[in-house]
Amino acid sequence: MTDRSIHPNTRVLLDAWRRMQENPQGHALEGPDVRDHASLVERIFVIERREDLSWLVRTSGPALNALVGRNLVNRNWLDLWTGPDRAMMAAFLEGIRFDGAPGVVRGRGETLNGDCAELEISLMPLSPEAGRTPRHRMLGLCQTLGSEQALAGKSVFRHRISMLVPPDTRRLGPSLRLVANN
């Protein structure tokens, strides 16, 4: 996934995810401190794929719960979307799970009276725990992009997708190798 995201918290979390993939044992020592990113932690969530292809919310930060007006824990993440947006989100989650790399969703959240806030949702696959059967879990971050005041304290009722930035699984490095024989 390329860094086209504009929210600084998204960039911090993507950088931390990359460090965790490169050095699973040392990322905690080299990474950012939670105290430096309190607003990020309050908007983090973890979802887990179930056998029925639903995505159960395992944990959800208080700022995210306040944004949607309810505690999301033990609810299906896909229930936040309807119609084609739900189908796109389900396929997008499967793409991230299959590719093993982060993806970003851009969209908007709407209140019951039509007020809107622009949203950026980043999703990152989590590695399975050592010695356990693979569980399909993702770490997520839901950020408003400077327009949360437009909601006037009302909770988001409907989510709409405007753009999906899929995982970037390209290999870095030369794609052509020159061999000379003298």
Image (cartoon, rainbow, N blue to C red):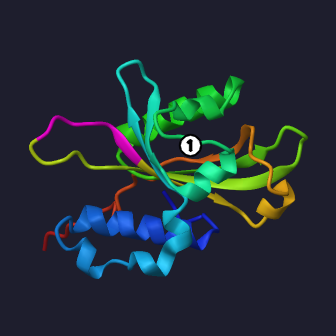
Q: Position of residue 133 (x, y in %)?
A: 16, 34
Q: 177 left or right of 152?
A: left
User: Toward which corner of the image does residue 97 lie, by quadrant?
Assistant: top left
Q: Which of 34/126 is in front?
A: 34
Q: Position of residue 45 (x, y in %)?
A: 47, 50
Q: Which of 56/5 is in front?
A: 56
Dominant SS of magenta comes to: loop
Query: How many numbered discs, if any?
Result: 1
**Residue located 35% across and 21% down the image:** 51
Q: 60 left or right of 51?
A: right
User: Toward which corner of the image does residue 16 lie, by quadrant?
Assistant: bottom left
Residue that protrudes farthest toward the left in the picture: 131
**Type of the residue with mark 1:** Asn
**Residue located 26% across and 72% down the image:** 27
Q: Position of residue 46 (x, y in %)?
A: 42, 47
Per the image, label 1 sits on a secondary structure element best described as loop
Residue 3 lies, with reference to residue 58, above or below; the image says below
Q: Is residue 40 magenta?
A: no
Residue interval drawn in magenta: 132-138
Residue at mark 1: 71
Judge whether residue 173 can be spotted in this image: no
Residue 69 lies, with reference to residue 63, above or below; the image says above
Q: Position of residue 173 (x, y in %)?
A: 33, 67
Q: Residues within 10 Å of mark 1 (few under 14, many from 20)?
A: some
Image quadrant in which the C terminus is located: bottom left
**Residue located 51% across and 32% down the image:** 75
Q: Which of 87/135 is in front?
A: 135
Residue that protrudes farthest toward the right in the picture: 113
Q: Is residue 137 magenta?
A: yes
